Amino acid sequence: QVQLMESGGGLVQPGGSLRLSCAASGSIFRIAGMGWYRQVPGKHRELVAAIPSGGSANYADSVKGRFTISRDNAENTVYLQMNSLKPEDTAVYYCFGVVAPTVAPTLRSYWGQGTQVTVSS
């Protein structure tokens, strides 16, 4: 069983910062990509940022220069540093990981439960 657990959401004023964390746990053989999506009511979930196990991260155009994704492979954790936050960044942020569990080492996607980020004055 593989689980992803997010933390770090909350309420912040425009221009402020938040750092999201997501830790993968369970019987993990290998983690390939990890990243973050976000979703607002009535809209599709959109990719915010993703980072492979080796290589460069990629970002949605709307967050480039403001958000930074990083990961700690030893801790199976991915982070999203969000700076210069705007009201339009308000959404539920979901962590994902492309993981091969030990019981069946085939890569598949796993999701966290989501964490609310609200940017408002």
Image: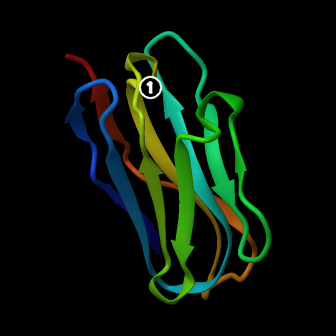
Residue pointed to by mark 1 = 89
Q: Which quarter of the image is occupied by the C terminus?
A: top left
Between 41 and 12, the one lying in front of the other is: 12
Q: Could you say where residue 56 lies in the image, as x and y percent from the top left?
A: 77, 64
Between 52 and 17, the one lying in front of the other is: 17
Between 20 and 45, the one lying in front of the other is: 20
Taking the spot 44% from the left edge, 53% from the top edge, the residue there is: 81
Q: Is residue 104 left or right of residue 35?
A: right
* SS at badge 1: helix
54 versus 16 height, above or below? below
Taking the spot 54% from the left edge, 72% from the top edge, the residue there is: 71
Q: How is the image coloured?
A: rainbow
Taking the spot 58% from the left edge, 28% from the top edge, the residue there is: 45
Q: Could you say where residue 25 lies in the image, as x and y percent from the top left?
A: 42, 77
113 versus 5 height, above or below? above
Q: Is residue 109 left or right of residue 79?
A: right
Seen as rendered, the residue at the extreme right is: 55
93 versus 74 height, above or below? above
Taking the spot 50% from the left edge, 85% from the top edge, the residue there is: 27
Say what amino acid the circle numbered 1 marks.
Asp
Q: Is residue 84 left or right of residue 99?
A: left
Q: Could you say where residue 102 lies in the image, as x and y percent from the top left?
A: 61, 88
